[in-house]
C-alpha cells in the first residue's frame, strides 16, 4: 500500500500535468491483426474527448484497454492517475462505462438496477438513495424508472445505462458509441444528457462515435482514428479550419454582370480570395458569418442581380476525407470517393 501511495503521489506531484487519461504507444494485436497500432493521447480532467472513426478502426478495442477489460500488447495507459495494467482495481473504482451492448436485466426495474449497481460499488443504502435522487433529475427517465426494463424504448435503455455508469460518481466516463441504432429524437436526448453530465458534474467523458455530427456537437477535442492509428487530433473548429476557409457563395441571375461585383468584393476587409464559375461567385474568408452582411451590402451597392447568397463552412466530413482519403457513411462504413470528391460505394 505504501508503494501504491508513493506511486500515486509521484504521478500527482504537478497538478498541471495530471491527465484524466494518458496513453503512450498503446498497441493491441489479435494474432497477426493489429487492432490498435501505437496510440498516444492525453485527455484533460473535465474534457469531452471524441474518438471518431469508422467500424473496425480500433475505437472499441481502445476503450476495452482503457477500462481494463483487455491488456495492451505494448505501451502503457493511465486512467484517473492509475496504470490500467498494474492497478486495474483502482481504475475500475474511478470510472463509469457504458458499452455498445448494455447488460440490463429486462425483468428488473430501473431503480432495482441502479440500487444493485450502487451496492456493488460499496455504497451504503443511504448513499444509494441520495444518488438515485440526483440521477432522477440528471438522467431524465421519469416514472419509468420504477417500471421493468422490458418496457423501455431504446433511448430509455441508453439513459438507464448512463445512470448505472454514474451511480458511484466516477471521475471518468467511457461511452462507446452510445447512440448507435437510435432514432434522431432519442439520439438528441442522449446528446443532451452527455453535455449536461459534463457541464453540471464536470465528468471527464471519453466518447467513441462513428457520427461526424455527434463528435462536432459534443466534443471539446476530437481524435480521428483510422486503421488503428490517430491520424488527426484537435478541437472540431481547429480541425475544420485546417482543411479550408469559409465560403460565401453568391449565385447571380442569368446574364448578370460579374466583373464589377467581383472587384468590389475583393476589396472588402476579411476577404481572402474571390473566384467565379459560371453564374456563381465564391468568396473565401476566415469568418463567413461576419462577412455575409457586408457582401450583401456591397452587391446591392453594385446593382448586382443576385439569386441567392449562402454560407458553406468546412465540416468534419471534409477533415475525415482529407486525412483518410475516404468519407464516412451514416452506418459507420468507409466510402470511396471519385476524382471530384463524391462518394462511390461503401467498403468494410
Image (spheres, rainbow, N blue to C red):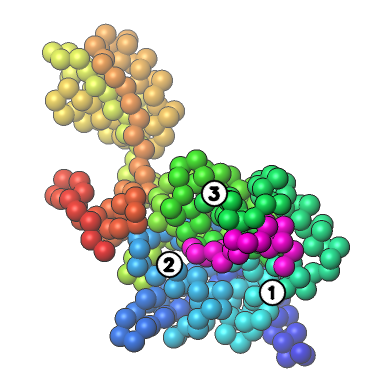
Per the image, label 2 sits on a secondary structure element best described as helix
Q: Is residue 105 left or right of residue 247?
A: right
User: How many circles with numbers are drawn on the protein?
Assistant: 3
Q: Callout 1: few (<14), some (14-19), or many (20+) C-alpha neighbours within 10 Å?
A: some
Please determine whether, in this image, residue 254 is positioned above or below residue 182: above
Q: Are marks 2 and 3 in contact (CB under 8 Å)?
A: no
Please determine whether, in this image, residue 199 is positioned above or below residue 84: above
Q: Which residues are magenta?
A: 98-116
Please determine whether, in this image, residue 245 is positioned above or below residue 109: above
- Name the residue located 32 percent from the left edge and 81 percent from the top edge: 33
* Rendering coords of residue 196 (x, y %): 64, 47
Per the image, label 1 sits on a secondary structure element best described as helix
Identify the mark nearer the N-term, 3 or 1. Answer: 1
Check disc 3 and report the residue beneath it.
153
Identify the mark nearer the N-term, 2 or 1. Answer: 2
Per the image, label 3 sits on a secondary structure element best described as loop
Amino acid at each position: 500500500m505504501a508503494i501504491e501511495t508513493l506511486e500515486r503521489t509521484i504521478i500527482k506531484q504537478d497538478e498541471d500535468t495530471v491527465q484524466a487519461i494518458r496513453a503512450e504507444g498503446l498497441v493491441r494485436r489479435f494474432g497477426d491483426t493489429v487492432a490498435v497500432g501505437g496510440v498516444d493521447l492525453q485527455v484533460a480532467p473535465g474534457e469531452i474527448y471524441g474518438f471518431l472513426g469508422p467500424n473496425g478502426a480500433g475505437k472499441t478495442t481502445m476503450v476495452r484497454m482503457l477500462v481494463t477489460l483487455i491488456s495492451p500488447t505494448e505501451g502503457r495507459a493511465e486512467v484517473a492517475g492509475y496504470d490500467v495494467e498494474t492497478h486495474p482495481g483502482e481504475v475500475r473504482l474511478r470510472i463509469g462505462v457504458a458499452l455498445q451492448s448494455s447488460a440490463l436485466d429486462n425483468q428488473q426495474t430501473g431503480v432495482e438496477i441502479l440500487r444493485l449497481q450502487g451496492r456493488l460499488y460499496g455504497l451504503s443504502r443511504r448513499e444509494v438513495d441520495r444518488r438515485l435522487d440526483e440521477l432522477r433529475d440528471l438522467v431524465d427517465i421519469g416514472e419509468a424508472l420504477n417500471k421493468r426494463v422490458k418496457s423501455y424504448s431504446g433511448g430509455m435503455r441508453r439513459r438507464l445505462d448512463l445512470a448505472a455508469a454514474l451511480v458511484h460518481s466516477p471521475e471518468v466516463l467511457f461511452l462507446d458509441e452510445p447512440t448507435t441504432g437510435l432514432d434522431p429524437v432519442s439520439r438528441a436526448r442522449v446528446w443532451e444528457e452527455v453535455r449536461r453530465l459534463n457541464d453540471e458534474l464536470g465528468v471527464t467523458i471519453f466518447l467513441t462515435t462513428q457520427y461526424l455530427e455527434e463528435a462536432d456537437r459534443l466534443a471539446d477535442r476530437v481524435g480521428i482514428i483510422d486503421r488503428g492509428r490517430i491520424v488527426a487530433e484537435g478541437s472540431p473548429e481547429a480541425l475544420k479550419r485546417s482543411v479550408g476557409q469559409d465560403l460565401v457563395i453568391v449565385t447571380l441571375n442569368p446574364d448578370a454582370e460579374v466583373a464589377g461585383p467581383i472587384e468590389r468584393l475583393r476589396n472588402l476587409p476579411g476577404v481572402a480570395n474571390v473566384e467565379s464559375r459560371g453564374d456563381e461567385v465564391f468568396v473565401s474568408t476566415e469568418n463567413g458569418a461576419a462577412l455575409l452582411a457586408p457582401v450583401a451590402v456591397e452587391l446591392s451597392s453594385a446593382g448586382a442581380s443576385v439569386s441567392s447568397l449562402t454560407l458553406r463552412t468546412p465540416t468534419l466530413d471534409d477533415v475525415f476525407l482529407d486525412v483518410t482519403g475516404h468519407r464516412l457513411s451514416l452506418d459507420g462504413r468507409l466510402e470511396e470517393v471519385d476524382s471530384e470528391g463524391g462518394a462511390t460505394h461503401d467498403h468494410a
